[in-house]
Amino acid sequence: MRSIVALKILLYDKATTAGSLIGVIAIVFLVGQQLAVLFGLFTYMSVLVDHSGADIWICSKNTLNINATDTLPERYADRISGLPFIAWAEPVLFGNATFITRDGKAESLQVVGLQPSSRALWPWRFHEGSVEDMLEDEGLTLERLDLGVYGDPKIGDVFEVNDVRMRISAITQSIKGFSGRMAFTNVVKARKILKTTPGRCKAVVVKLKPGVPLEEAIAGIQAVLPDTEVMSSAQLSARTRIYYVKNTGMGGSFGFSTMIGALVGIIIITLTMYTGVLQRQKDFAVLRALGARKSDIFVIVLCQSLIIALVGIFIGFLLLGSFLNGTVDTNLPVYMPRRIAPMLALGTLLLCMLGSLLAVRKAISVEPASVFR
């Protein structure tokens, strides 16, 4: 009964209800959009690690992020391959280079070198071409979303990358890195482009046999290679993201904008709910005069907040979903983990309840006798 009264009041005072709904929608959409971009950037930061297909990464000592690791001897892969818990181990090669466009502009590029027998770091999505095309003698992939930066090259066009002749042989789709635009080629050309000493690599990746405890495997490899940094893919991914968040000011920037979005929403909710109670003081006084208790008024106001929150969250997520779908396969880094959506909804609901507290205090303080004034 009290929830029906709350709904009737909301439908009667449409202007105040609309103002509160806007506040809830602002929280869901603004905060959700900021979080989606932040998590999208996270996927860029550790894209090689997350898509490597490996369980363990072996890097140079004190590696703080995947893009800052020094070179290692390739023989490390052979040294640990005989360990009983390892399915395979292989060296990987990647690094930054400069792509020269037709008009002579220099554009950055992160080159990844692969060999036909490689089991890690393969490009996972092609727009045009295939792995076989990528492994050709002078073959090089470019990302479809970055083609405009490189002067819109076509398959078969020839360019220079770090003074090495390369031919565009395949186009990847939505494979982007945080430290540079991603390109894949065979390991021979990658070594020439990156000027890497023969017998050296950037890291060694390891795949474990099924059922092997990860921590035990890390300890076993570390004992064999004490002068390296051995960590799981998840650890390296997290370490890379933390490094960039701490050292680029990204965490503070996104944290501040997210807080502002939530603050704007809660202020709108608080003011509109409070204004609505002020405008309906006589209605609450009539309810009190008819026998309604303070607890009844309390429940009515909270029901109003709950209804506004649920409707606003629903509309907000519709808008957020449209935003996320509209940015698929674009240059805007957007990604929303599944666990974040319910957390955002719950957080918004709690903010709505918090924003209604001031209105609740005013509503339950209304005296029944005030209806006769």
Image: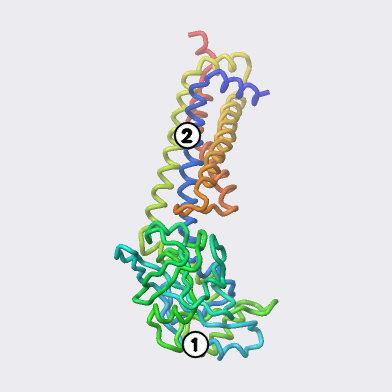
Secondary element at tag 2: helix
| Residue 290: x %, y % from top left | 62, 14
Q: Could you tell me which residue is drawn at 50 percent across and 13 percent down?
A: 370
Q: Residue at x 29, y 65 (%)?
A: 104
Q: Position of residue 226 (x, y in %)?
A: 49, 88
Residue at figure coordinates x 62%, y 20% from the top left: 292
Give the CA separation, mark 1 to mark 2: 57 Å
Q: Amino acid at mark 2?
A: Gly
Residue 329 in percent (x, y) is at 51, 53
Asked if residue 152 is positioned above or below residue 134 in the image, the reply reads above
With respect to residue 202, does 183 lie above or below? above
Is label 1 in contact with label 2 (beta carbons under 8 Å)?
A: no
Q: Quadrant of the N terminus?
A: top right
Q: Which residue is mark 1?
A: 74
Location of residue 261 (image quadrant): top left
Residue at which label 2 appears: 23
